[in-house]
Amino acid sequence: MRWSLTWIRERLIAAYAPRMDVVSDAISAVRVGSPSANRTRASGSWATRLPAYEGAGFHVVLAGSCQLLLDEGRRRIPLGPGDVALLPHGSAHLLADARAEGARAVERAVDFERWLATRPAAFDAEAEAEPGVDTEAGAGADVEVMCGKYRLDRAQAHPLLAELPDVVHLPARPDRHPELRAALGLLAHETQGEAGGRPGGDIAVPGLLDLLLVYSIRAWLADRAEAGAPGWAPALRDPAVATALRLLHSDPAHPWTNDRLAARAGVSRATLARRFTPLVGRPPMAYLSWWRVTRAAALLREGGAPLDAIARRVGYGSPYALSHAFSREFGTTPGRYRARAGGKR
């Protein structure tokens, strides 16, 4: 009877607990502040340098074409209309006109902030009658591009994000990733018009930029899964592993054991361990311990909740137990971490 009551309780938790997913949690665990972006036009011969950044950068080509250069111009990625280039690790790079040669672009590249100040802002209320991505640049420009960045705390990035390459290039294809194309169309529409912005734009634009990040990572995962590539893409496609991850993320404070988790995932303990560990990179309970302190770090950054409340929320019986686990993982105490994170906001 005791086992039956436990079985019923766990299924009630599964039915009514919030359904969290790994991608959302991976992003929210490292996000700090709001994203920012600038929409601009360029023509002729030009090149701009963007230094390494403690976050993620992105470029969306709204019209025309240009190129992204890495490794001091030795690696070139052509960007056309509708293309998205996400730099999830904040890698240093150059953006240049489509005809620029790598070495020459490196020599004449201008600092991005200085370059941006000389560009005409791409605000033209009459430029587009419909939202979307054009194939021709407006007002005589060769390219119209949106450049932006996300602030991230990389102290304990989720391994899913760590697995991303230095550049995620998503070429525009009408038959692929419709939600990404829709978000780009809304973003293009929301940022067109006069420089004063549209009513509610202070909420709409950051929200659409957040969608751009989520949809870009989702598109990359989908492409990886279809290609049969190793890593987190197959982990999220494996029914048992994906279910186990969802359960751990939905309720990290639950007193999980390998047996309970395997039973809820619908497989044996041995089967879950055999499938979970190679795909995720650590055994289920080790992943849970890591996720608990990572979630605690996010809660410490978000506000002033007492340490005992945070400890209970992530599955520790006391602030001391959380502090011990947190210090082992982060190399500092929760209090010092919170003070340092508060200074970065």
Image: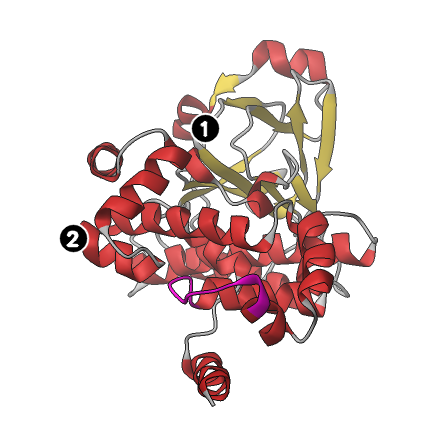
Q: In this rendered view, identify the residue nearer to me: 86 or 63.
A: 86
Residue at image point 66% right, 61% down: 236
- x and y percentages locating residue 163 in the rendered image: 63, 41
Answer whether labels 1 and 2 touch (C-beta < 8 Å): no
Magenta stretch contains residue 56:
no
Asked if residue 130 shows in the view, the reply is no
Q: Which residue is mark 2?
A: 306
Q: Is residue 318 left or right of residue 50?
A: left
In the figure, is residue 307 to the left or right of 270? left
Q: Which residues are magenta?
A: 251-259
Query: Circle 1 sits on which residue?
Result: 53
Q: Nearer the viewer, residue 336 or 319?
A: 319
Q: Is residue 302 above or below residue 248?
A: above
Q: Earlier in the sequence, mark 1 or mark 2?
A: 1
Q: Residue at x 62, y 68 (%)?
A: 262
Picture residue at 28% right of the left edge, 41% below the top = 323
Of 284 and 193, nearer the camera is 284
